[in-house]
Image: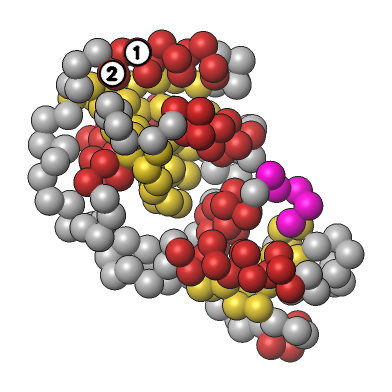
Amino acid sequence: MKKGWKHRAIIGLFLSDFKAAHNIISEGRRRGIEVLSVSSLAELPFSAKVIITSKKDNSKLPVPVLFVEDFPSYKNLIDRAYEITFGKDCPKFVTVSIDPGEKRTGCAFFVEDILLRTSTYSDKRYLFDDIDEFFNIHKTCRKYIVIGKGAGDLSYALEKDIHERFLGAGQVETILVSEDSSNRRNVFISARPSDESAAFMFFVKTRGKLILCGR
């Protein structure tokens, strides 16, 4: 686990599909989140607030359950499991914060004020597909996209493309934020690439406004 970037959380996994279980554990490990695979409910620790299973394997489980069949990717499955461990069963708002670049675009995904993950994209199509999936698993939430401005016309072109792509995705609001000070050393996620760290800082700069608007 990367110190200072993730809180400790344990996600239970009760799954007979070994390949799927391996992929889910790998996705959690990549993000510094512990996914504990168990073969019986007796092995499930009290610290596990959610368990991932399948509709085939499901039995009477003592904690909230997420079914692998209900999610478009393991990435989104871990997103949802992680937020539930911190009491965000019904979050009020989610945010995607973006640092536009000519070659690479950094992105950070938040549920309310909890960082779920960061990513870097070299192809805008993959960025938009990820945002689309993220919003789809949070259909009832208010949705915000924060964009850093200052990289020439990149931020305005990106905002235009986002409006065209996500106009019908419910309550989606875009916010442009100055890139001033976004490149300073980020002690919270210092191990992340600079593009992802900048995206994180854009959220920090707008956090107060987002919390007020997202209530």
Do callouts 1 and 2 mark residues in contact (Cβ within 8 Å)? yes
Q: Is residue 206 above or below residue 83?
A: above
Q: Residues within 10 Å of mark 2 (few under 14, many from 20)?
A: some
Helix, strand, or loop for circle 2?
A: helix
Q: Which residue is mark 1?
A: 157
The majority secondary structure of the magenta stretch comes to helix
The three-letter code of the residue at mark 1 reads Ala
Task: State the residue at coordinates (80%, 74%).
Answer: 16
Helix, strand, or loop for circle 1?
A: helix
| Residue 145 visible somewhere in the drawing | yes
Residue stretch rendered in magenta on the structure: 68-72
Answer whether residue 193 is magenta in the image. no
Front-most of 78 and 126? Answer: 126
Name the quarter where the N terminus is drawn: bottom left
Q: Is residue 95 above or below residue 43?
A: above
The three-letter code of the residue at mark 2 reads Leu
Task: State the residue at coordinates (32%, 68%).
Answer: 2
* Protein image colouring: secondary structure
Q: Which mark is residue 50?
A: none
Q: Is residue 36 above or below residue 30?
A: below
Task: State the residue at coordinates (46%, 18%).
Answer: 162
Residue 85, x across and y down, in percent: 54, 63
Residue 56, x across and y down, in percent: 89, 64
What is the C-alpha distance between the residues marked 1 and 2? 5 Å
Q: Which residue is mark 2?
A: 154
Answer whether residue 71 is magenta in the image. yes
- Compared across the picture, whether 210 is left or right of 76 comes to left
Residue 39, x across and y down, in percent: 75, 84
